[in-house]
Image (cartoon, coloured by chain):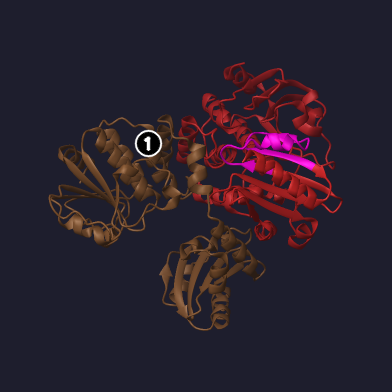
Chain colours: A red, B brown
Amino acid sequence: MILIDIINILRESKKVYIMPHVSVDGDGLGSSIALGLALEKIGTSVEVWLEEDVPSVYSFLPGSKLIRVYNGEVDLPREDIGTVVALDAGDLARLGKRVEIFNNAEITINIDHHNTNDEFAQYNYVNVTSSSVGEILYQLIKMMGIEFDRDIATCLYVAISTDTGGFRYSNTTSVTHQIAGDLLNSGVNVADVSQKVFDTVSYEKVMLMGAAINSLELFENGKIAFITISDDVMMSTGAKEEDCDGIVNIGRNIRGVEVAVMMRSRSDGELKVNLRSNSYVNVSEIAKLYSGGGHKRAAGCTVKGNIEDIKSKLLDDIRKVL
Amino acid sequence: MILIDIINILRESKKVYIMPHVSVDGDGLGSSIALGLALEKIGTSVEVWLEEDVPSVYSFLPGSKLIRVYNGEVDLPREDIGTVVALDAGDLARLGKRVEIFNNAEITINIDHHNTNDEFAQYNYVNVTSSSVGEILYQLIKMMGIEFDRDIATCLYVAISTDTGGFRYSNTTSVTHQIAGDLLNSGVNVADVSQKVFDTVSYEKVMLMGAAINSLELFENGKIAFITISDDVMMSTGAKEEDCDGIVNIGRNIRGVEVAVMMRSRSDGELKVNLRSNSYVNVSEIAKLYSGGGHKRAAGCTVKGNIEDIKSKLLDDIRKVL
C-alpha cells in the first residue's frame, strides 16, 4: 500500500473516525489530533475516539473538541460508520473496546510504524523506518496539500518528539530532524511544549523518586544498582502504579552502573522486577530465568516469594554475567 | 565581519591555537575539537587549549590528542604564536590565564553567539541567532569544503545539542534541526551520545537529588517549592558544589509550581539562593531585593543571616507577587 491510495480515500470520505491505541501516548494522541485538524480543514467531519481520558501531560494539546472518550458512559457509534483510521496500533487488540467501531466501518485504514503490525485493515500503510506515526502523518498531510498551522504542527511535534525520547533514541534519523525543523517554521513553541511534555512531573512522582533514591543500593563496585519500592512507599508518597515507570533509570543512569534493578514488592508477596543494562549484559536472559522476557537492555519478570531471598538470588544471577 | 574572511585567514594559518571559555561546556569543547579536527584535515597544526581538565561527562569525545590543559604544570606557549581562535567566549576574561596566549598571537579571531560579546579580537564573527557556536562552525567547516567525518559530526552534535538542552530551549530553530539532521548523516550515534551527555550522572549527584527531595516543601497550595541543602547534606552525600546546579529544577518541574527556590546554606552563615519561575513571576525582581540578579525565569542572590529568618522573608516576598 502506498500513501497516495490512502490519501485518495481520505479525500473522498465525508466522515472519518480516528483511533489511536489504548493507553494512548504522545505519538498516538498527537498524530490523531493532527490528522483530525488537517481533515477538518478540507471540510471532513472528524471524531477522534480514545479508550481512556487524555493523559494530563497532554491536556494542553489543541483539538479537544474532536475528542470522544469511550468510558462506558457514552455509546459507541455503530451505524453509518464511513471511514475509520487506526493509528500507531500494531493489531486489532490495541483498539480495545473501540474495535466495534472499526468492525462496523465501511472502509478501514491502518497507519503504523511498528514492525509487528499485522496489517489488520483493508488499507494498510506500515513504515518501520519512521521514528513515529507523527513522521508518517507529516508526509501524508504535506502530500494532501493541506497547510500546516501552529496547532497541527504542535501535535505532530509532540508525536515525533515523544516517540524519539526528545530526539535521543536510536530511531531518530536525519529525516526526523528535517521534519522537526519544518514544524518549528509553522510556529511550535519549543520551550513551552518541551517543558510540558518532558519536564513536568507530579509531586507524588517526585516523592516516589526520593524514596527510590533512599532505597538505592550499589553492589559489585557500583556495577549493579538496586532499587526497592514497597506498598508502604506507594502509600506514603501517594504515587500511582504508573509512576513506577522509568524509576529503574535512576539506577541505570549512574556512572559505572551496568545493570539496574527496580523491584516493586507488593504486600501480597508478588514482586515485579524491572531490569536495565547499559552496554553488554543481556538482561532478557536474566528475566527468562524467572519466566519473564524483554530485550537485551530492558526486560522484566514477575515473581512470588520472599523479597530478601529473591533479591539475593537475582544478584547472584547478575553477578554471573557481569 | 563575514565568515569568509575568517575562513581565508584559517586557510593561510600553519598553526592554530583554539581556546574555548573557562569552565568549558559542551558547546565550547565540542566546537573547539570539531574545528581542530577539521583544520588538521587540511594540514594545519592545531592545539586546543583548555583552562581546566576535560569534564568527565565529555571524556568520550574524540580528538583528545589535540588537547592541552593549562593547569599550572605546563608552560603556556608565548612565542611564535600564529593564529588564535577564541570560541564561545564573550570577552577576554572568559579566556582565564590563557589570555597570555591570545595576547601574544599574531592574528586573533573570535567566534561566538552571545549578544554580550564585546568583539575583543582582530577578526570577530558573532552570530546571536545561532543556538550555539557549534551551529556556526558547522557552516564554517561546510564553507571550507572540509568533509565531515563521524568524529567532527559527533563533536558538533554535542556542541549543538547541549547548548539547546537537547533541542528543547527556545534558542532551537529550524536551522538547528536541519544541521542536526545533516550531522546524523555523517554517522553520529544518537542514542549512545545522548545517554552519555544527558542521562549519565554521578552516584553523589543522585544522592544529592534524594536529599533535595527529602528537604522539599510546598507552600501556597503547591505554587512555591522550597529545597534546602546544608553543608551536612553535602558532606553526607559526597556531592561537589557543582552538583547543586539544576537541583532547583526538581522543584520547578512539579506540576502546579510557579516559583522554585533552592537554598544552599553554608555553615559560615552564607546562603546561596537559586530562584526559578514557570510562567509569570519575575524572579529577578525578587533577587534584586537581596542584591542579586538574573532573568525573569532564572535568578539568584547570596545572603548572610539566619536561615529560618531569610527563608520566611523570601517566602513573604514571593507570596506578594504570586
Q: Chain of mark 1?
A: B
Viewer-nearest residue: A306 or B156: A306
Return the x and y of residue B154 as percentages of the image width and height.
40, 38
Viewer-nearest residue: B67 or B38: B67
Q: Is residue A289 magenta?
A: yes
Query: Which corner quadrant of the image does residue A63 belong to?
Result: top right
The residues colored magenta run A275-302
Query: Which corner quadrant of the image does residue A27 belong to?
Result: top right
Viewer-nearest residue: A149 or B182: B182
Viewer-nearest residue: B15 or A17: B15
Q: Residues within 10 Å of mark 1 (few under 14, many from 20)?
A: some
Query: Relative to B156, is A60 on the left or the right?
Result: right
Q: Residue at x 62, y 62 (%)?
A: B210
Tag 1, which secondary structure?
A: helix
Q: Which amino acid, mark 1?
A: Asp
B120 vs B310: above or below: above
Q: Which residue is mark 1?
A: B151
Query: Relative to B278, is B87 on the left or the right?
Result: left
A52 vs A146: above or below: below
Return the x and y of residue A220 as percentages of the image width and height.
62, 50
Query: Relative to B118, is A73 on the left or the right?
Result: right
Q: Residue at x 79, y 39 (%)?
A: A70
Query: Which corner quadrant of the image does residue A84 belong to?
Result: top right
Q: Residue at x 55, y 52 (%)?
A: A195
Image quarter hosting the C terminus of chain B: bottom right
| Residue B164 in sight | no
Q: Is residue B15 magenta?
A: no
